Image (cartoon, grey):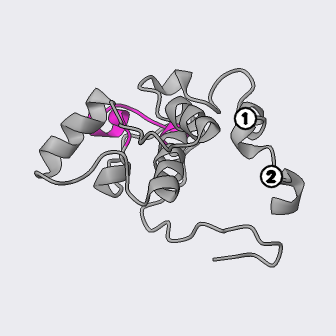
């Protein structure tokens, strides 16, 4: 959907889950191509899984395909996601590649948006220089 301001709005969060007070869950749900390694490995997860999914979405909006493709069955896809070696076409924009790599970091605690600066680090990334965050609220 497109807002009056011209910004896109993501919809269809049928697999969304509201987290408890500790911000963590063990629930396994989601579309296979978008699952984070910690979900696949049946580990406790939280907001960092959403940062992973944002990285998948940015990659897909740039190339038209997800970085990890379901071609030979779900187990093969899951192995590919856990190995975390997405390919980037030569034409992939520099700042876009940088943010995708930071969002798809294998370690949830090292993902962009998770460190000391939290979401501010994400908003200040060069990829978002044209975004007026206050207009999105």
Which numbered marker is on residue 125? 1
From the viewer's perspective, is residue 71 above or below residue 22? Answer: below
The residue lying at 48 percent from left, 59 percent from top is 16
Residue at image location 65% in from the left, 23% down from the top: 115
Q: Residue 40 magenta-drawn? A: yes
Magenta-highlighted residues: 36-49
Front residue of this view, candidates 58 and 137: 58
The residue that disc 2 covers is 131
Whether residue 105 appears in this view of the structure is yes
Which residue appears farthest toward the left when viewing the image?
72
Q: Is residue 130 above or below residue 90?
A: below
Q: Of callouts 2 and 1, which one flags the residue occurring earlier in the amino acid sequence?
A: 1
Q: Secondary structure at mark 2?
A: loop
Local packing at callout 1 (Cα closer than 10 Å; few below 14, some 14-19, many 20+) is some
User: How many C-alpha atoms fall within 10 Å of the one at disc 2: few (<14), some, or many (≥20)?
Assistant: few
Q: Toward the viewer: 58 or 136?
A: 58
Image x and y of residue 59, in percent: 48, 49
Most foreground residue, 43 or 102:
102
Element under label 1? loop
State the mark number for residue 27: none
Q: Is residue 115 above or below residue 36?
A: above
Task: Give residue 121's quadrant in the image.
Answer: top right
Dividing the image into 4 quarters, which one contains the N terminus?
Answer: bottom right
- Marks 2/1 in contact by CB < 8 Å: the verdict is no
Residue at 13% in and 44% down? 75
Picture coordinates of residue 30, whole percent (x, y): 36, 56
Magenta stretch: residue 73 in it?
no
In the picture, measured across the screen, residue 76 lies left or right of residue 65, that is left
Classify the position of the C terminus by image quarter. bottom right
Q: Residue at x 67, y 68 (%)?
A: 8
């Amino acid at each position: 959907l497109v807002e009056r301001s011209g910004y896109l709005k993501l919809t269809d969060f049928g697999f969304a889950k509201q987290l408890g007070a500790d911000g963590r869950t063990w629930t396994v749900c989601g579309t296979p191509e978008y699952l984070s390694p910690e979900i696949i490995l049946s580990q406790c997860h939280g907001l960092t899984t959403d940062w992973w999914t944002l990285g998948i979405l940015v990659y897909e909006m740039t190339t038209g395909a997800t970085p990890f493709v379901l071609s030979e069955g779900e187990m093969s896809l899951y192995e590919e996601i856990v190995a975390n070696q997405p390919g980037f076409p030569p034409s992939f924009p520099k700042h876009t590649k940088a943010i995708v790599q930071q969002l798809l970091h294998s370690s949830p605690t090292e993902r962009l948006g998770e460190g000391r600066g939290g979401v501010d680090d994400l908003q200040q990334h060069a990829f978002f220089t044209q975004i007026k965050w206050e207009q999105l609220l």
